Amino acid sequence: MSEALAFLMAHANTWAATALLCIGLWVVMVRGNLIKKVIGLNIFQTGVFLFYISMGYIIGGTAPIVEEGADAVYSNPLPHVLILTAIVVSVATTSLALALIVRIRESYGTTEEDDVIASDEA
Amino acid sequence: MNLLAHLPALQIVVPLVAAPICAVLFNPRIAQPFAVLVSLVTFAISVGLLNEVLAEGEIVYHMGGWEPPWGIAYVIDPLNALLLCLVSGMAAIVMPAVRLGIGAETTERSRRLFLSLALLALTGMLGIVITGDAFNLYVFLEISSLSSYALIATGNDRRAAPAAFNYLIQGTVGATFILIGIGLLYMMTGTLNMADLAVRIVDLRHTAPIQAALAFILVGAAVKAALFPAHAWMPNAYTYAPSMVSAFFGATATKVGAYIMIRFIFTVFGAEWVFGDMMIGWILVPLGIAAAFAGSLVAIWQTDLKRMLAYSSVAQVGYISAAIGLGNRDGLIAAIVHVFNHGLMKGALFMVMACVILRLGRADITSFRGLGRRMPVTMGCFVVAGLSMIGVPLTVGFVSKWYLVLGAIEAGVWPVAVLVIMSSLLSVIYIGRVIEVAYFAPAPDDARIQEAPALLLVPTLLLTVLCITFGIATDTTVGVAAYAVQFLLGGLP
């Protein structure tokens, strides 16, 4: 029991990231409301952010700023920089998605996917 | 400073810088010629790079003078040089017609930024193809994707916005899958440079993260390439986007997805492992054949011809996937040649749609009645590009299918060769019924219906002529593809 618990705890961040990925993907697929889909997409991407950020962390490591004479262990800054880029991309994607939803609402009067499809078929 | 030495950087920088300039040039009479000029310069750079690669072999360019693994390297081998030519060539051919072509098919308020978006999409796709850095590939992928979602939404049909939204959701999930895959690769190897990755992966292939990375990247690339069954975004997106956008993306966007697949399988992971131990061929070939049948069968029943062409693209991506999955030399040549050839023919077919929509306002099958007499040149282009889609000899379509069949026989899977030919017969039906309506049905009594203006007609004709030129002079495309395969397979037979 304690071994399994230790295994879970040792990879706590990875489990959390995986859970976020699954929750996000589920929301994107199952929810019919367009705004909820965008929220799901954000949760999904947050899972990836957490995954990258945990990857760069080294136990006992500190921020990678070189200090005179200090014999410190540094975390790997590269994944953190990479994920900054991905966060910017995610912000752009979210804003574009919301802009599209505004346009859909203007022409269809709804933000429910089912209503949009039904309105086109009618 | 020698500008020629910096061609790889200029390939990206020229359209990237031009995009915001286009946005601030309010007067379309200045912005339009400027965008045309930029696309021509970009195409000239691509041709220059292809020449250099063919003469001297692989080019490695260190962005900003930073050596990898610290800096980003652009690596140009024959494969991506050919794709650079396809992408920038399509842009150079389509761009002059954009202003006329989008007039009837976009919303008023989106027209001003259309050119900037088109240049950004061009930048993104060129970047994906040229870069030798895995994370840089993801960034360019998102640049091209975001601008293509916006471009699709410029269509004046109200269904364009939901189509773009669906593409955004599926495209983002696909791109994020690629991002996860790249993260796993970095976690295991500590590098993002593709050449470094290829070396370090060899000893780590048995580990779960590397295998998961392969799965994530292939699934992500399959979404971007619209490989059946991940093609759901494509029919609506290409139907409701302006025809010029469909022509450019139909010719390039799905091809870039296929490129990502080829690049990661052959350059990063190594073909013998992917097709040997991981047996990816057993996924790609059946999916490709299923796509060829599903796409062609659905295309037969479409009344909207843009939607028909989109489903035909599903089928053609299937051929590319099947060709990659064969995992041998001829199969890979077929995949690369078909990426190029299908770009030409699908570009020509969507340009025909742009001509027809400009004159008739719609492109459903009934509106094609008697067009063979009213728009002889436009329909002539449709017939030639359509025959090419079927794979008639002397057209480009024949060349790629020939190599696909050769590859299947070489791999010892003759049922694949038979299925490819059978699915080609389905395309006879969906192209044939349009030709029947256009030439054998009486023309409507409407004097407004006449030949499309020269500005639209010339690019359409040019693409059609290229369909035949590369169908006869096969040495050029097959030669480059064969040379590219040497690089990808590293001297293996």
Image: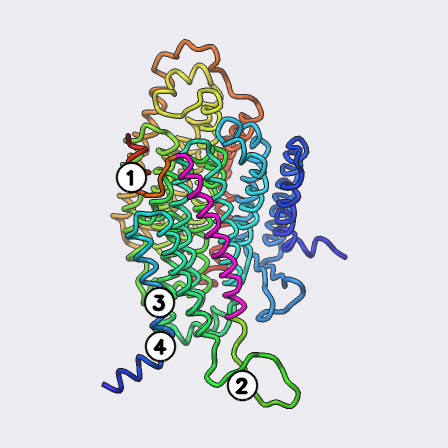
Q: Do the residues labelled 2 and 4 touch (CB within 8 Å)?
A: no
Q: Tell me the residue at 36%/23% (across/down).
A: B435
Q: Nearer the viewer, mark 3 or mark 2?
A: 2
In this view, B256 is above or below B489: above
The answer to whether residue B265 of the structure is visible from this angle is: no
Q: Mark 1 to mark 3: distance in Å? A: 33 Å
Mark 4: amino acid: Ala
Q: Mark 1 to mark 2: distance in Å? A: 61 Å
* Residue linked to disc 1: B423
Q: Which span is picked out in magenta?
A: A80-107
Q: Which of B115 and A33 is in front in this view?
A: A33
- The secondary structure type at the circle numbered 2 is loop
Chain identifier of the residue bearing label 2 in the image: A
* Residue linked to disc 3: B212
Q: Mark 1 to mark 4: distance in Å? A: 50 Å
Chain identifier of the residue bearing label 3 in the image: B
Inspect the magenta stretch and tell me whether residue A105 lies in it: yes
* Residue linked to disc 2: A73
Residue B344 location, x and y as percent?
48, 38
Q: Tell me the residue at 46%/39% (across/down).
A: B153
